[in-house]
Image: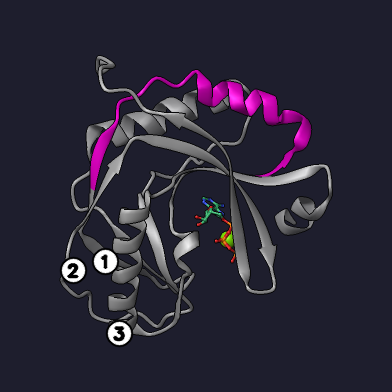
Amino acid sequence: MAEAEAARPENLRLFFALWPDDVTRGALHRSGKWLHRHWGGRRMRADTLHITLAFLGATPAGRLDALIACAGAVEANSYELTLDQAGYWRHNRIGWLGVQRMPPQHIELVEKLNVRLQAAGFPVEPRPHVPHVTLLRNTPGGDIPECRPVSWPVGEFVLVKSVTGPNGAHYAVIRRWPLETDIAPTAA
Ligand code: ATP
Ligand code: MG
């Protein structure tokens, strides 16, 4: 069980993410209020809002240095993400905000990170990446409403430790890596 493994002291439950600045966080939290009015469910706390880039799960603490080296080797550009699409996943009853148009820099960041992680022997997600901010848990969903776009200036990515408590997961940012402004795009 991943949860049981993560509970062992030598393991950390880790993931790489985009972590919003305060202005973006405020806008996302208001979107959560709006979506909650439509669909109900449990609204996520403002301090939990993020986009997962790569989920590692239970990771031995001794592998942290290798993980940090992977992230440090990623060279990718900053970009703007426009979150303008509400969505609902029936299988986990999550209501989220995602993107209609994926910036190529976002795909590149995720791919470069995954390449490094895989080369270092970390688990990578075989399914296509779907960037989303979870806004509601345990929601029945409903008709997809038109939403007011949230602009997220993405200037860094982070490594996060997840600790599951009685009130849901709490996240702590362990480390941050800035994105660049002038990396030449790689050929597809
Ligand atoms: P909880 O599991 O306690 O209800 P949570 O899902 O927010 O809370 P984690 O399970 O630690 O917390 O997940 C951290 C982040 O990684 C979340 O964005 C979650 O959606 C994502 N995540 C969790 N498991 C996976 C997985 N198997 N594959 C991809 N992403 C995952
Ligand atoms: Mg989870």
Residue linked to disc 2: 147
Q: Position of residue 22 (x, y in %)?
A: 37, 54
Q: Is residue 149 left or right of residue 51?
A: left
Does residue 43 show up magenta in the picture?
Answer: no
Dot 2 and dot 1 residues touching (CB under 8 Å): yes
Q: Position of residue 8 (x, y in %)?
A: 83, 50
Residues shaded magenta: 57-81
Ligand 1: which quarter?
bottom right
Secondary structure of the residue carrying numbered label 3? helix
- Separation (CA) of disc 2 from disc 1: 7 Å
Q: Amino acid at mark 1?
A: Ala
Q: Residues within 10 Å of mark 2 (few under 14, many from 20)?
A: some
Residue labelled 2 has its Cβ within 8 Å of some atom of ligand 1? no
Residue linked to disc 3: 37
Q: Position of residue 58 (x, y in %)?
A: 70, 46
Q: Amino acid at mark 3?
A: Arg
Indicate which label's residue lies in the foreground, 2 or 1: 2
Q: Residues within 10 Å of mark 1 (few under 14, many from 20)?
A: many
Which residue is rendered at x = 36% and y = 49% of the image? 130
User: Would you say residue 40 is visible in this rendering?
Assistant: yes
What coloring was used for the rendering? one colour
Q: Is residue 67 above or below residue 126?
A: above
Residue linked to disc 1: 86
